[in-house]
Amino acid sequence: MEEIEVSSWATLDALKKAADIIDTVGDLHESHQVSIFCVIEDDYLELCYTDSSVNYLRRFEDDEEFEEAIEERKEEIEEGLYAGQDYEDEEDEVEEELDLEDEPEEF
């Protein structure tokens, strides 16, 4: 695998227009990055758009490495989206501890 940093989304967009898109992983609104997996002639590419770090272009040696990268990226994005799950569980525990409904309503 080879990787190059790309400073402009316009460069990634130009490559995307010339490519056959295989899969899209992520969402700029939810995970702050999206990876477009595509093929141009014999080149297997990942175009990574991000709003929080450096954009990049990755080229994979073969179809097998390309498929593995798609699965890895899906797992990374999924882990990132559900990382806040523990916060919601803790919030429920705090509400149970306080249990404000048991106190009398006097004004």
Image (cartoon, helix red, strand yellow):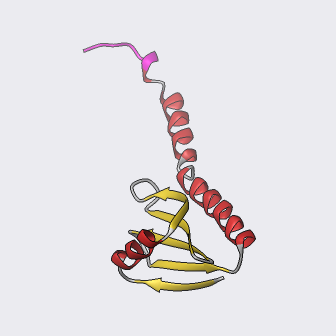
Residue 56 lies, in percent from the top left, at: 49, 79
Quadrant assignment for the N terminus: bottom right
Residue 27 lies, in percent from the top left, at: 45, 56
Q: Nearer the viewer, residue 19 or 75?
A: 19
Q: Which secondary structure is most common in the magenta stretch?
A: loop
Image mark count = 0
Q: Quadrant of residue 62?
A: bottom right
Residue in the image at 58% along x and 76% along y: 41
**Position of residue 73 in the picture relative to residue 53 (left or right):** right
Q: Residue furthest front?
A: 41
Residue 12 lies, in percent from the top left, at: 41, 75
Examine the rendered structure and indicate whether residue 93 appears above or below residue 76.
above
Q: Quadrant of residue 105?
A: top left
Examine the rendered structure and indicate whether residue 7 appears above or below residue 33.
below
Q: Residue furthest right?
A: 64
Residue in the image at 55% along x and 35% along y: 93
Q: Nearer the viewer, residue 1 or 84?
A: 1
Q: Nearer the viewer, residue 72 or 19?
A: 19
Residue in the image at 66% along x and 68% along y: 69
Examine the rendered structure and indicate whether residue 49 appears above or below residue 24.
below
Quadrant assignment for the C terminus: top left
Residue 32 lies, in percent from the top left, at: 43, 62
**Position of residue 44 in the picture relative to residue 50 (left or right):** right
Q: Is residue 90 magenta?
A: no
Q: Quadrant of residue 43?
A: bottom right
Residue in the image at 55% along x and 57% along y: 80
Q: Is residue 105 magenta?
A: yes
Extent of the magenta region:
101-107
